[in-house]
Amino acid sequence: MIIIIGCSTQDKEEIVVIARVGDKTIQINEFKNRYSEYLNRIGAKDNLLFRNQFLEGEVDRIVLLAIADSLGLGENLEIKDKINHARQSGILDEFFYREIFKTYQASDSLLRNAFEKSKTEIHVRHLYANSLEKANQLKTQLNAGVSFEELAITIFQDSALAATGGDLGYFSLG
């Protein structure tokens, strides 16, 4: 298999091809969009190592889809679903970029609010009730000043949950 990296143009709009696998290409604009989405998803900053790894992953994806097609794996229903999912993930990423990301501009206040929420941690405890009536009784006891720990000891049959007072730890919204 030969992979050629280069540029090609069509019509008046320049299309830069950064990788070619057989008759399939990876164009710079689609690469930038998918790579940017990838960085946002993992919360990382751009660097040459990530960029190269992502490009290799895109090439591998195209190669695997081509191999699956050539072996007739698309005839197996389960494998066909996975192949379609792999193809559609690229289509959905492009749709998101073109139809949503480019047309919807979040305001500064919305972005600031989302950023603040992503940095906010909350400490979560829980109590279990198998009915609304029992849940309301627990709420009444909490409002009356009974602690989570005391209630957890009485309602949890699991000794670990009872000992931790229903503590689930810290969570963030982002």
Image (cartoon, rainbow, N blue to C red):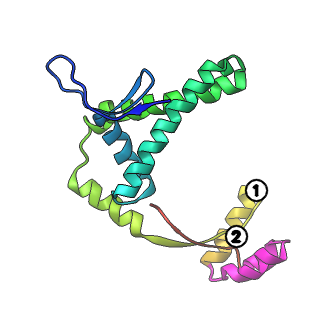
Mark seen at residue 55: none
Residue 66 locus on image (x, y percent): 55, 24
Residue at left offset 60%, top offset 26%: 67
Label 2, on which residue?
138
Label 1, on which residue?
131
Looking at the rendered structure, the secondary structure element under dot 1 is loop
What is the three-letter code of the residue carrying label 1?
Ser
Numbered range of the magenta stretch: 144-164
The 10 Å Cα crowd at callout 1, few under 14, some 14 to 19, many 20 or more, is few
For the C terminus, the quadrant is: bottom left
Residue at left offset 45%, top offset 50%: 53
For the residues bearing labels 1 and 2, Cβ distance under 8 angstroms: no
In this rendered view, identify the residue nearer to me: 163 or 1: 1
Residue 100 locus on image (x, y percent): 32, 35
Mark 1 and mark 2: span between their CA atoms? 11 Å
What is the three-letter code of the residue carrying label 2?
Leu
In this rendered view, identify the residue nearer to me: 170 or 141: 170
Count of numbered tags: 2
Magenta stretch encompasses residue 112: no
If you read the primary sequence from the N terminus, does the residue marked by circle 1 or circle 2 appear first? Answer: 1
Residue at left offset 34%, top offset 56%: 48
In this rendered view, identify the residue nearer to me: 121 or 99: 99
What secondary structure is the magenta-colored segment mainly? helix
Residue at left offset 71%, top offset 79%: 165
Asked if 42 appears above or below 98 in the picture, the reply is: below
Give the residue at the far front of this rendering: 2
